[in-house]
């Protein structure tokens, strides 16, 4: 894949070689994310960070990644703060904002909205999440995390065993991750969800036809065993017809230390795209796991900066200029890892 000037709208755009290229550039970003070195390779460039749906990690880490490369960020948050609320089309919004930016990251609740926006944009657009459809940068950072965690255990993505837990119907992070994992070989998928929130059949069919094993269940007892990775997700309440309907599924599947000890292997890696819903009625990933060394959720969020820096560097064709323009930091830096 030639990244230069490309939109990133779906993980369908990636093959194994392009994933590995993103990971190689991400590895190179570690000293910058750790505040050991500074680069100004995007000095003068402007990111349009357009989030029309709630976001903490994705919005801030895209902005932070751009800043770490030396660029400036302009941001819109929430539909109400933009002219979309006055009836402006994606076409007009994209024509306007692409005149102000070198690259745009966009999130919106409507499936396909970011592709529609990108079609009218004059600069590259990255999908920061379009409804229940896709979240490509999340899937890349998840896969990068999986790769690093498994490598530490002497394992590989090919042949691994993953349990995906929770709202697999509406979870776009899971949708993109399944497509990306589908590129690899011989993976065992254990899909654990309430009956009504199963992974859409098109994803399951693609995985099976690519030679992967997929088993579905509705409870942790049968689904959690023999997993290298357990990936827990939140009930996507904003995608349901009503809050009452979403409420029915909250709290049905919970991972806590007792469940982990009973069903998981001693080094099963625990992941979640976050936010975890810590309200008592949900609490799908309990705080009592916070000191479990296999809890990788904050390694995922740290890795998100690396992956987003890599995407920017590849799309804007500066990946090879970063080290040459860098210097050590000149301020006190706290130890991050
Ligand atoms: N932050 C992820 C997303 O935007 C996962 C979630 O919200 O549950 O899709």
Image (cartoon, grey):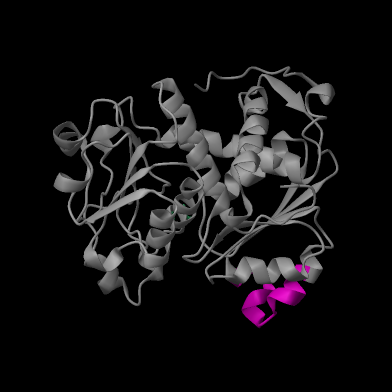
In this rendering, does residue 64 appear at all? no
Say if 240 sits above or below 102 in the image.
Answer: below
Q: Quadrant of ligand 1?
A: bottom left
- Give the percent coordinates (x, y) of residue 49: 67, 55
Left-right relation of 213 to 82: left
Residue at position x 24%, y 36% from top? 226
Q: Quadrant of residue 269?
A: top left
Left-right relation of 272 to 107: left
In this rendering, does residue 139 appear at all? yes
- Give the percent coordinates (x, y) of residue 238: 40, 67
- Give the percent coordinates (x, y) of residue 261: 17, 31
Q: Which is nearer the eye, 185 or 228? A: 185
Q: Quadrant of residue 186?
A: top left
Residue at position x 39%, y 33% from top? 296
Say if 193 sits above or below 150 in the image.
Answer: below
Residue at position x 41%, y 54% from top? 207
Give the prevailing secondary structure in the magenta stretch. Answer: helix
- Give the percent coordinates (x, y) of residue 198: 30, 63
* Residue 232 falls inside the magenta stretch: no
* Residue 93 falls inside the magenta stretch: yes
Q: Which is nearer the eye, 148 or 327? A: 148
Q: Which is nearer the eye, 294 or 237? A: 294
Span of residues in magenta: 80-94
């Amino acid at each position: 894949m030639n990244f230069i000037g490309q939109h990133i709208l779906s993980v369908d755009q990636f093959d194994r070689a392009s994933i590995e290229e993103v990971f190689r550039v991400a590895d190179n970003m570690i000293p910058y994310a750790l505040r050991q070195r500074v680069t100004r390779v995007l000095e003068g460039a402007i990111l349009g960070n357009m989030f029309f749906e709630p976001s903490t990690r994705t919005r801030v880490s895209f902005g932070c990644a751009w800043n770490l490369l030396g660029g400036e960020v302009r941001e819109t948050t929430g539909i109400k703060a933009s002219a979309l609320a006055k009836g402006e089309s994606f076409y007009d919004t994209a024509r306007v904002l692409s005149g102000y930016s070198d690259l745009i990251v966009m999130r919106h609740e409507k499936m396909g909205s970011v592709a529609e926006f990108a079609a009218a944009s004059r600069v590259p657009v990255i999908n920061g999440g379009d409804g229940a459809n896709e979240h490509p940068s999340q899937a890349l950072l998840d896969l990068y995390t999986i790769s690093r965690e498994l490598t530490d255990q002497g394992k590989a993505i090919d042949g691994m065993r993953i349990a995906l837990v929770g709202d697999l119907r509406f979870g776009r992070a899971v949708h993109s991750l399944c497509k990306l994992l589908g590129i690899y070989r011989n993976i065992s998928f254990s899909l654990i969800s309430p009956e009504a929130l199963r992974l859409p059949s098109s994803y399951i069919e693609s995985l099976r036809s690519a030679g992967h094993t997929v088993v579905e269940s509705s409870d942790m007892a049968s689904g959690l065993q023999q997993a290298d990775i357990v990936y827990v997700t939140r009930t996507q309440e904003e995608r349901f017809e009503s809050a009452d309907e979403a409420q029915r599924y909250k709290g049905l599947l919970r991972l806590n230390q007792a469940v982990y000890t009973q069903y998981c292997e001693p080094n099963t890696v625990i992941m979640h795209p976050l936010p975890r819903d810590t309200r008592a009625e949900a609490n799908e990933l309990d705080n009592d796991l916070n000191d479990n060394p296999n809890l990788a959720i904050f390694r995922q969020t740290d890795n998100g900066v690396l992956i987003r820096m890599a995407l920017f560097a590849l799309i804007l064709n500066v990946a090879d200029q970063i080290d040459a323009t860098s210097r050590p930091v000149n301020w006190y830096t706290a130890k991050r890892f």
